[in-house]
């Protein structure tokens, strides 16, 4: 029999929560192993925008943001599910966690001038000072391990380059409108293509990929052992019921004994059909949800349930919703494009099967997704269509379908984009009510031309404007749907992770249905129930808490074990 691998802490999952826990634990001299079931490190964080919502950071404090304002905002965001103790623990540790990463690891953050909270009409909301970004980095700091990092989501890049939300992305939006933007984009793309040819992959890492690259570099520096392609088959426990480690499969098949415990950080369960059927209100049949996440197959939830834990779904929203377009590459492989940025641009509207608008398209992807689910709750399936006229398509495109001068044949062939010379023809191709669509456009246009949306309030908050075109007047989010031809992309429901999750106590220890602690087992990140009660406060509402509670778990795991008086007898562990 192969001798068990020994460590102090076993972390399951290599996304931001797991790596935060690993880095802090290792910085305290603990022996740490991180296991990742996927072939790449970084999880969903590595394909994300990388924002982290962290009120109480140094920029916010300098701008006068107060703890009371943050608490007020979060309380109003999800009043029926507000977690007072959890929010207090989050705010108590944000500055400490950020200081650790910036001062004791390779991770650094930038502090954008403008990053509005998603619900700017709520008390306590702020225009900036809460959401921060990782700095860009060069993947060559990892040596050959750079090829072990999760690549960008290909459908979300521009010919291999991943634009950053803000001024960088704005240059790409205006590439066909300004020589300065064209030159800027050309430089970015030429560098991307040169690096890809020379180094097998672009070496400039931005967004969440930069964050994970810097975290893996820090883990290497601290001596953390990183195992990829290594799923956890089962947790192990001793006769007293304490979790002692895990049985592993894949590249590192064997047993790990973790002296202080196991931290579950393997993401949520939106990729698990059975759990979706149980907890997602719109997906009772398990075929009406499409997740772009990486590794969110419910592994952490399954392990916790087998150990006696439970799923806590007492949240305002069980998932962080994101409308997606489902299409297929020429090789027949399914691809997804999450509509996280552009639906709120002027000239785009979203309609249902009746050709009617059903919400404010300039809301956050999560809030608009929730509106879409609610609107379709009595229908067989959850879907809609994003529609643009010729001018809007030429200027902005529709998500993955890029604007002029990008040829559109590929987008038709993959099923991403539909075209009709008239609204009636487009409606027929989509299978929606043509008269309803024509009426919607006729009613929408006069108000849009005046810069108002009496029906849904589109373009009425600074966050709405942030998602629009600030150079468009009189309202950055509103323009008429004018002359054809007309274009459309179907949107269905996806997510960025789950807010329902493993039930934990205030120390992130996994608890049973009776509320008793399962000794030696912690859960953080999207694996655990949302500290915000299912609310989505702003950019980085997954990554912010994941950084803080991952850090906190790594910091406190030894103290929690000591408080339990855990004695490891060295006897063979029983598999569960």
Image (cartoon, grey):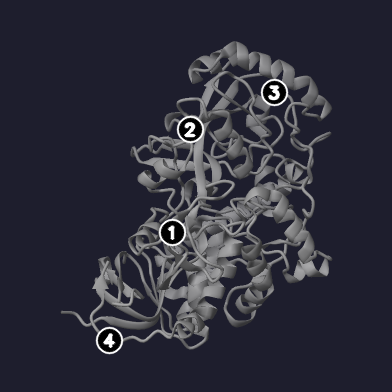
Which quadrant of the figure has residue 394? top right
Q: Which mark is residue 570?
A: 4
Residue underneath mark 3 = 481
- Tell me which numbered mark, 3 or 2, is placed earlier along the sequence: 2
Q: Secondary structure at mark 1?
A: loop
Residue 137 shows up from this direction: no
- Tell me which numbered mark, 4 or 2, is placed earlier along the sequence: 2
C-beta proximity under 8 Å, tags 1 and 2:
no
Counting other residues with Cα less than 10 Å from the Cα at mark 3, is it few (<14), some (14-19), or many (20 or more)?
many
Residue underneath mark 1 = 513
Image location of residue 400, percent across then percent down: 54, 40
- Tell me which numbered mark, 1 or 3, is placed earlier along the sequence: 3
Q: Nearer the viewer, mark 1 or mark 4?
A: 1
Mark 1 and mark 4: span between their CA atoms? Answer: 29 Å
For residue 173, side relative to residue 212 (left or right)? right
- Tell me which numbered mark, 3 or 4, is placed earlier along the sequence: 3
Mark 4 and mark 2: span between their CA atoms? Answer: 57 Å
Q: Secondary structure at mark 4?
A: loop
Residue 102 shows up from this direction: yes
Residue underneath mark 2 = 416
Image location of residue 541, percent across then percent down: 61, 56
- Work out which quarter of the rendered image holds the N terminus and state it: bottom left
Q: Is residue 549 above or below residue 273?
A: below
Q: Nearer the viewer, mark 3 or mark 4?
A: 4
For residue 307, side relative to residue 336 (left or right)? left
Residue found farthest to the front: 514
Image location of residue 466, percent across then percent down: 74, 46
Q: Secondary structure at mark 2?
A: loop
For residue 547, side relative to residue 266 (left or right)? right
């Amino acid at each position: 029999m192969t001798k068990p691998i020994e460590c102090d802490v076993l972390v399951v999952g290599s996304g931001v929560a797991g790596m935060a826990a690993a880095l802090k634990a290792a910085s305290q001299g603990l022996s740490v192993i991180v296991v990742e079931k996927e072939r790449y490190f970084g999880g969903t964080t590595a394909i994300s925008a990388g924002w982290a919502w962290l009120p109480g950071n140094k920029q916010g404090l300098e701008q006068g943001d107060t703890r009371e304002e943050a608490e007020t905002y979060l309380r109003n965001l999800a009043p029926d599910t507000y977690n007072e103790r959890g929010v207090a623990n989050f705010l108590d540790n944000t500055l400490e966690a950020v200081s650790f990463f910036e001062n004791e690891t390779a991770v650094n953050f930038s502090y954008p001038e403008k990053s509005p909270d998603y619900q700017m009409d709520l008390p306590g909301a702020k225009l900036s000072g809460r959401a921060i970004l990782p700095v860009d980095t060069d993947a060559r700091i990892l040596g050959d391990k750079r090829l072990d990092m999760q690549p960008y989501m290909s459908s979300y890049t521009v010919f291999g380059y991943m634009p950053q939300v803000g001024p960088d992305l704005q240059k790409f939006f205006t590439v066909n409108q300004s020589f300065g933007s064209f030159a800027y984009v050309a430089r970015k793309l030429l560098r991307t293509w040169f690096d890809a040819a020379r180094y097998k992959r672009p070496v400039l890492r931005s967004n969440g990929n930069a964050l994970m690259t810097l975290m893996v570099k820090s883990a290497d520096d601290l001596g953390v052992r990183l195992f990829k392609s290594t799923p956890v088959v089962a947790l192990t426990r001793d006769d007293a019921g304490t979790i002692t480690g895990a049985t592993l499969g894949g590249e590192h098949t064997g047993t790990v004994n973790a002296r202080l415990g196991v931290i579950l950080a393997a993401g949520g369960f939106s990729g698990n059909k059975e759990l979706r059927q149980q907890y997602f209100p719109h997906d009772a049949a398990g075929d009406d949800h499409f997740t772009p996440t990486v590794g969110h197959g419910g592994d952490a939830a399954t392990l916790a349930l087998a150990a006696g834990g439970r799923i806590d779904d007492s949240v305002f929203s069980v998932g962080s919703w994101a409308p997606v377009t489902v299409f297929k590459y020429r090789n027949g492989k399914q691809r997804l494009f999450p509509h996280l940025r552009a639906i709120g641009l002027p000239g785009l509207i979203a309609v249902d099967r009746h050709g009617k608008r059903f919400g404010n398209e300039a809301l956050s992807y999560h809030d608009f997704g929730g509106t879409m689910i609610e609107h379709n709750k009595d229908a067989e399936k959850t879907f809609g269509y994003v529609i643009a006229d010729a001018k809007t398509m030429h200027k902005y495109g529709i998500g993955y379908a890029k604007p002029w001068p990008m040829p559109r044949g590929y987008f038709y062939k993959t099923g991403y984009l539909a075209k009709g010379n008239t609204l009636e023809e487009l409606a027929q191709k989509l299978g929606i009510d043509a008269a309803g669509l024509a009426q919607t456009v006729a009613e929408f246009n006069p108000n849009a031309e005046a810069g108002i949306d009496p029906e849904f309030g589109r373009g009425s908050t600074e966050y709405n404007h942030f998602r629009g075109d600030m150079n468009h007047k009189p309202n950055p989010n509103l323009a008429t749907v004018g002359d054809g031809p007309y274009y459309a992309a179907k949107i269905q429901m996806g997510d960025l992770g789950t807010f329902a999750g493993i039930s934990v106590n205030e120390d992130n220890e996994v608890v049973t249905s009776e509320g008793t602690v399962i000794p030696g087992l912690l859960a953080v990140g999207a694996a655990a129930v949302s500290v915000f009660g299912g609310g989505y406060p702003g950019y980085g509402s997954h990554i912010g808490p994941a950084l803080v509670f991952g850090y906190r778990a790594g910091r406190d795991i030894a103290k929690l074990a000591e408080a339990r008086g855990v004695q490891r007898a060295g006897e063979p562990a029983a598999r569960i």
